[in-house]
Image (spheres, helix red, strand yellow):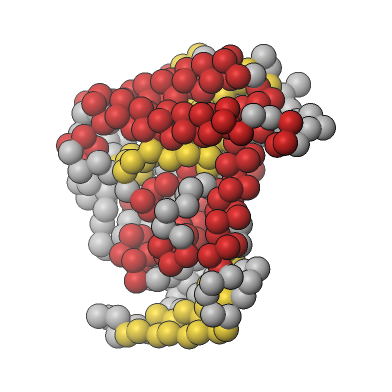
């Protein structure tokens, strides 16, 4: 049975801090190598020139441990995508050799249907110890218009094929049905095929490098180093919060459409709360998922508090985002999300 057993009854004091630093730096290098591999092998210019992608190594719980280069707004996608997988699959259903795909914002895809997330669990001697994941913008995934981003869309069904956190590979075996569905639901099958396999190659490199680390230092040391990195991120965030004046702050701004966007910040020594509940109802294709809104807030929080700290899962523990379902910052199914990024920016 797969499990997510925590490190044995030891503390970080039982490990060598120098070794921790080596492992933590190696995680960043792995994420960067995954990024370069995907860039070098992708078919589409939006990936290999625009760099519309991101890569991450995550801990066994799906929290980001280290991120590669790419679009900052994508970095916070991958932990939420893994959590979407956990909602759909029990631990016993997640096996070595599995590769998951999701582009559906209602099933952990987070952004819009053009952005495909690929994720693979990393096992060592039957023990789930990490995840590797990437996301990249694919040129066309079907829908009403070439490029799959219709300004006239009112439902997600009009924006392309939906892949709701399914297995591309099951215990190393290719799920040909899913590949076939992807290939026939695009106007550019050659490009999609090339970008898909580039993403798979990036995952395989990431998995290999993580396992090399675990073989060298041991699974317990590896997991302890990751946990220590998370704690460092949290300490840095909380230290920064203590230097910000406590209080409640409100702001509103009229948009080009005449709509009013509103935000309320409540800051204290323990929490940074961003309340976006008082905002317009979802409409058209300019909406963001709840998770996508959280990513935008995470970017602002990082820049506002400690830009130089590790951008891992631990750093964002003091952050709380409040949204209202059915609004532009928390779209409900089957709302469209083609132009989610414009909404996140205005948030």
| Relative image position of residue 91 (x, y in whole percent) | 69, 31
- The answer to whether residue 2 is above or below residue 242 is above
Q: Residue at x 78, y 32 (%)?
A: 10
| Relative image position of residue 207 (x, y in whole percent) | 49, 22
Q: Is residue 171 visible?
A: no
- The answer to whether residue 62 is above or below residue 260 is above
Q: Is residue 179 left or right of residue 2?
A: left
| Relative image position of residue 303 (x, y in whole percent) | 40, 62
Q: Residue at x 25, y 24 (%)?
A: 41
Quick one: 244 or 90, which is closer to the camera? 244
Quick one: 182 or 279, which is closer to the camera? 279
Q: Is residue 131 left or right of residue 47?
A: right
Q: Residue furthest right?
A: 9
Q: Quadrant of residue 295?
A: bottom left
Q: Residue at x 60, y 54 (%)?
A: 234
- The answer to whether residue 58 is above or below residue 198 is below
Say which quadrant the C terminus sits in. bottom left
Q: Residue at x 26, y 53 (%)?
A: 149
Q: Is residue 247 visible?
A: yes
Say which quadrant the N terminus sits in. top right
Q: Quadrant of residue 241?
A: bottom right
Total labels: the figure holds: 0
| Relative image position of residue 211 (x, y in whole percent) | 54, 18
Quick one: 277 or 238, which is closer to the camera? 238
Quick one: 198 or 147, which is closer to the camera? 198
């Amino acid at each position: 049975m797969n499990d997510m057993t925590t490190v044995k009854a030891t503390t970080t004091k039982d490990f060598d801090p120098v070794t921790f630093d080596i492992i933590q730096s190696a995680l960043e290098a792995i994420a960067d190598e995954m990024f370069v591999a995907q860039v070098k092998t992708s078919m589409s210019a939006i990936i290999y020139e625009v760099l519309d992608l991101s890569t991450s190594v995550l801990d066994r719980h799906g929290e980001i441990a280290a991120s590669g280069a790419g679009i900052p707004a994508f970095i916070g996608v991958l932990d939420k995508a893994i959590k979407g997988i956990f909602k759909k699959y029990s631990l016993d259903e997640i096996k070595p050799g599995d590769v998951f795909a999701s582009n559906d914002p209602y099933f952990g895809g987070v952004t819009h249907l053009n952005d495909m997330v690929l994720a693979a669990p990393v096992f060592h001697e039957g023990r789930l110890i990490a995840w590797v994941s990437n996301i990249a913008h694919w040129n066309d995934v079907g829908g009403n218009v070439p490029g799959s981003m219709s300004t006239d869309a009112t439902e997600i069904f009009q924006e392309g094929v939906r892949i709701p956190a399914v297995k591309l590979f099951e215990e190393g075996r290719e799920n040909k049905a899913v590949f076939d569905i992807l290939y026939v639901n695009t106007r550019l099958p050659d490009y999609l095929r090339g970008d898909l396999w580039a993403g798979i190659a990036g995952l395989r490199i990431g998995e290999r490098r993580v396992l090399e680390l675990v073989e060298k230092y041991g699974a317990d040391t590896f997991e302890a180093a990751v946990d220590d990195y998370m704690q460092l991120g949290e300490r840095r965030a909380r230290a920064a919060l203590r230097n910000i004046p406590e209080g409640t702050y409100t702001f509103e701004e009229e948009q080009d459409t005449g709509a009013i966007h509103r935000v309320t910040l409540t800051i204290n020594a323990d929490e940074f709360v961003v309340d976006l509940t008082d905002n317009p109802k979802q409409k058209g294709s300019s909406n963001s998922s709840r998770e996508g809104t959280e990513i935008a807030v995470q970017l602002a929080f990082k820049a506002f508090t400690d830009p130089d700290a590790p951008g891992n899962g631990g750093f964002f523990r003091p952050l709380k985002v409040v949204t209202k379902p059915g609004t532009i910052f928390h779209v409900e199914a089957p709302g469209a999300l083609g132009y989610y990024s414009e909404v996140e920016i205005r948030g």
